[in-house]
Amino acid sequence: MRVEHHWWNGDVRLQRRDVYVRTDGALWEVEAQMGGPEGKSKVQQCPGKASAMILADAWRGPRWRWRELQ
């Protein structure tokens, strides 16, 4: 799967959160990660890009502090 979008909340410590939207061209998934690569994560399959983006928006919460990374 390739990463279509990756957002980061800007925190470099334990409160770091990342949200990823990934696809292989047919399947879509959203991953919410807390605490960096060694932290906890949750992955949700989505039926399409629109639903993946809606879920990613919901999991990010307030957008003013999130940055999109590439």
Image (cartoon, helix red, strand yellow):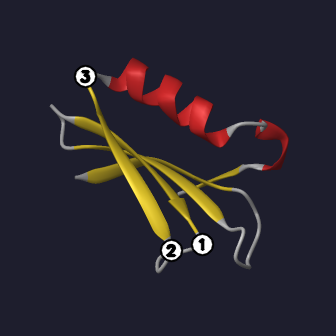
Secondary structure at badge 1 equals: loop
Instruction: Tell me whether the residue at label 2 lies in contact with that at label 1, contact meaning CB atoms closer than 8 angstroms.
Output: yes
Instruction: Tell me whether the residue at label 2 lies in contact with that at label 3, contact meaning CB atoms closer than 8 angstroms.
Output: no
In the image, what residue occupies the spot 28% across and 53% down? 2
Q: Whole-percent x and y of residue 45?
A: 27, 36
Residue behind mark 2? 39
In the image, what residue occupies the spot 74% across and 79% down? 13
Q: Whole-percent x and y of residue 8?
A: 65, 58
Residue behind mark 1? 35
Q: Is residue 53 above or below residue 64?
A: above
Q: Give the image quarter of residue 18.
A: bottom right
Amino acid type, label 3: Pro
Q: Is residue 48 above or below residue 12?
A: above
Toward the viewer: 2 or 18?
Answer: 18
Residue behind mark 3? 47
Sooner in the amino-acid sequence: mark 1 or mark 3: 1
Amino acid type, label 2: Gly
Q: Residues within 10 Å of mark 3 (few under 14, many from 20)?
A: few
Q: Is residue 66 left or right of residue 39?
A: right
Nearer the observer: mark 1 or 3; the answer is 1
Q: CA distance from mark 1 to mark 3?
A: 27 Å
Sooner in the amino-acid sequence: mark 2 or mark 3: 2
Q: CA distance from mark 2 to mark 1?
A: 4 Å
